[in-house]
Amino acid sequence: MPTPIIAIFDIGKTNKKLFLFNQQYQIVLEQQQEFDEITDEDGFACENIEALTNWVHTLLQQILQMPEYSLQAINFSTYGASFVYLNNSGEIIAPLYNYLKPFDEQLKAKFYAQYGGEQGFAVKTASPVLGNLNSGLQIYRLKYEKPELFAQIKHALHLPQYICYLITGRFFSDITSIGCHTGLWHFTEYRYHEWVYKEGIGEKLAPIYPSNQLMHININHKPLLCGTGLHDSSAALIPYLANFNEPFILISTGTWCITLNPFNTIALTAQELQQDCLCYIEYKGKPVKASRLFAGYQHEQQTKRLAEHFGVDKGYYKTVAYNASIIELLTNVSAAQEEGEAMMQQFVFAERNLTTFKDYETAYHQLILDLVSQQIISTNLVVEQNKTKKLFVDGGFSKNPIYMNLLANAYPTIEVYASEIAQATAIGAAMAVHKQWNNKALPLDTIQLKKYTASYAVPF
């Protein structure tokens, strides 16, 4: 008998992946692809949307022809802040612009002057002022910089919903993409912000389809179920929401370290927004308070610097074990040098003189101490000390014993766990629609945990 499966297209900015999961959420097949970026009309790097489109079509046909598998459903997770623009005929008429592309300062000033100022607008939309990372402003930019192109746009689809369109031929929007620092959504009124309609953008946005539902489709005369896709950060949270009921926070670590608290219902303040706090909307429509820190990038840069200074391999840090004595020594020195500061407000390791450290191990402990000091500032923006019961860390830093021990020391009243889940984003996209494609119970063993307990009081 063929194995019943769900296919998940998990599309990051660098790696494009396809996963086939069986009903126990075990990966039975994985394929990965990278595409070289192309450039837009201004010469700025952007996604090769044509290559991505062809890859999706090709893989789907291959899956359907595999006799060992019985495809039941399809869903998608992709990076955010990404719009694909289609005309009346459903054809792509513009590049998939890169959210890192600079946003014109004069146009930005005009927008915020008209719609309540940066602070007022940010509070209503739970969106820090991020330029093109506020994907709604990408469409606004086209209206004023490329009016002829704007006039041709019939459908503006976030990337997950564009992939859905490729397979279903249908146009939908999804709340997890809309509710992710886009500037589109009015969080307290739970609707699009008024500017979306005043600027004629609302008519270009497709109807919202529930993120936890599948639609019936036919491909090659085979009946299938298909979802509309999810924003990747929201998808990665789903396995945790499925496994844990009591209040927790998740620090998802990578280039960015994002602290997510799905149990914090306190409205964002202007001050929090200025400190890179924001809200996501999870797949059932509930706001998730979050904070961001560029810690993974800092770690990558500084470990290169350490390797060069001490004459070791770039990956040498992976061999460094947690040493409480080194931490005690460093924190005593730090307290003497930085009198009156419980936590460092800025990341300072880049300015530290490496010749003051006797060896790599000591310097690396200082690097992680500095990073965790900043991580605590970021995480404290969304944690609720008397309510939060568990803190999970997934991604790269979950495998770092120094980081994990320091975090446990910083939160002695919260259970701190290093979490390991294979492909959390893809599994989350599958679990979001579990009830409609899978008649078996959700497995409780998808997340592997390692508990860390406080061993030394670090004076953060």
Image (cartoon, helix red, strand yellow):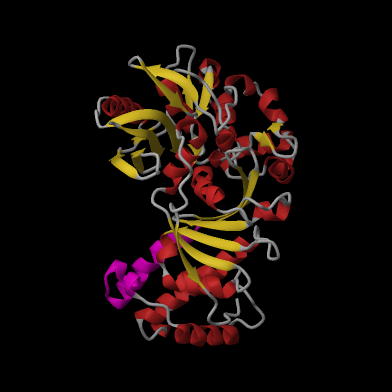
Seen from the viewer's position, the closer of residues 178 and 367 is 178
Instruction: From this view, report whether residue 204 is shown above or below residue 294.
Output: above
Residue 115: x and y in percent read 73, 35
For the question of whether residue 101 can be seen, the reply is no
Q: Is residue 13 magenta?
A: no
Instruction: From this view, report whether residue 192 is shown above or below residue 305.
Output: above
Which part of the image, by quadrant, shows the C terminus? bottom right
User: Which residue corresponds to the image point at 41% horizontal and 75% vertical from the top-left?
Assistant: 364
Residue 390: x and y in percent read 58, 62
Seen from the viewer's position, the closer of residues 303 and 458 is 458
Residue 117: x and y in percent read 73, 41
Seen from the viewer's position, the closer of residues 195 and 422 is 422
Instruction: From this view, report whether residue 288 is shown above or below residue 78.
Output: below
Q: Residue 59 falls in which quadrant of the image?
A: top left
Residue 166: x and y in percent read 41, 22
Chief secondary structure of the magenta portion: helix
Region rendered in magenta: 293-319
User: Which residue corresponds to the image point at 48% horizontal and 16% vertical from the top-left?
Assistant: 87
Q: Residue 45 falls in which quadrant of the image?
A: top left
For the question of whether residue 52 can be seen, the reply is yes
